[in-house]
Amino acid sequence: MNYKIIIILSISIINFKMIFADSLIKKETKKDKINAIIDEVDYAPDFTLEALNDSSYTLSELRGRVVLLNFWATWCGPCRMEIPDFNEIYKKHGSDKIEILSISISDTRKALENFRKVYPIDYPVLYGKSKDLDKIMRDYGGVYAVPTSILIGKKGDVLKTYPGALLKGHPVYSAFMNDLNLALNQK
């Protein structure tokens, strides 16, 4: 009779452990799924645009490198003033560490090619259809003025947005360079 009680208790304990363990596994799975969604929320919105060098750039393919998105236009004076400083940053760090993607918000390929004859740009110049560019600008919270630059970390997360020109000698430029160096040193 004691055997029956011991067996029944043992089976009950085993069943209880199996049910409890199963609920823990389900909770971990739900927690993992939630964390994955939260991680994706931090990622910069993905896009693909054509470049003047006849290649295309997809943002998500650049993970592992710091990316600076620079929304600009050829008719924008402050945008033109940023180009030499961005060229210098690009040359200093190289495209294996940082990718500066210059996204023209309104210019045609031909206009951009003519512009580059006068203003050398050492980093990729991207362009696209108005509809695609509008979507990208909306996805980034709305780009209401040019230039606007967005710093993206190695993990693909948006680190900071800089409305206005990033020019040497201005306080915002110092803050940007500090943010850039922190991003470059990210693991």
Image: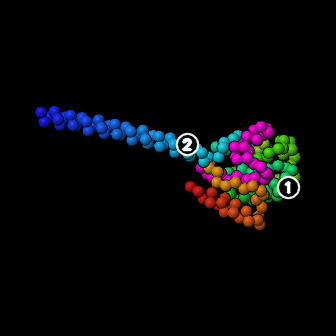
Q: Residue at x 76, y 47 (%)?
A: 103
Residue 31 image position (x, y, % from top left):
47, 43
Display colour scheme = rainbow
Q: Residue at x 34, y 36 (%)?
A: 19
Quarter of the picture holding the N terminus: top left
Q: Quadrant of residue 186?
A: bottom right
Task: For label 1, count other residues whose C-alpha is less than 10 Å away and answer few (under 14), some (14-19) or many (20+).
Answer: few
Q: Is residue 187 above or below residue 14?
A: below
| Amino acid tagged 2 | Ile
Q: Residue at x 56, y 46 (%)?
A: 39
| Residue furthest left in the image | 1
Q: Quadrant of residue 128?
A: top right
Residues rendered magenta in the picture: 128-155
Task: For label 2, count other residues whose C-alpha is less than 10 Å away and answer few (under 14), some (14-19) or many (20+).
Answer: few
Tell me if residue 153 is in the magenta stretch: yes
Q: Which residue is mark 2?
A: 37
Judge whether residue 90 can be spotted in this image.
Answer: no
Q: Nearer the viewer, residue 183 or 87?
A: 183
Tell me if residue 62 is in the magenta stretch: no
Q: Which residue is mark 1?
A: 77
Q: Quadrant of residue 93?
A: bottom right
Q: Nearer the viewer, residue 168 or 88?
A: 168
Cα separation, mark 2 vs mark 1, equals: 40 Å
Residue 170 image position (x, y, % from top left):
76, 65
| Amino acid tagged 1 | Gly
SS for dot 2: helix
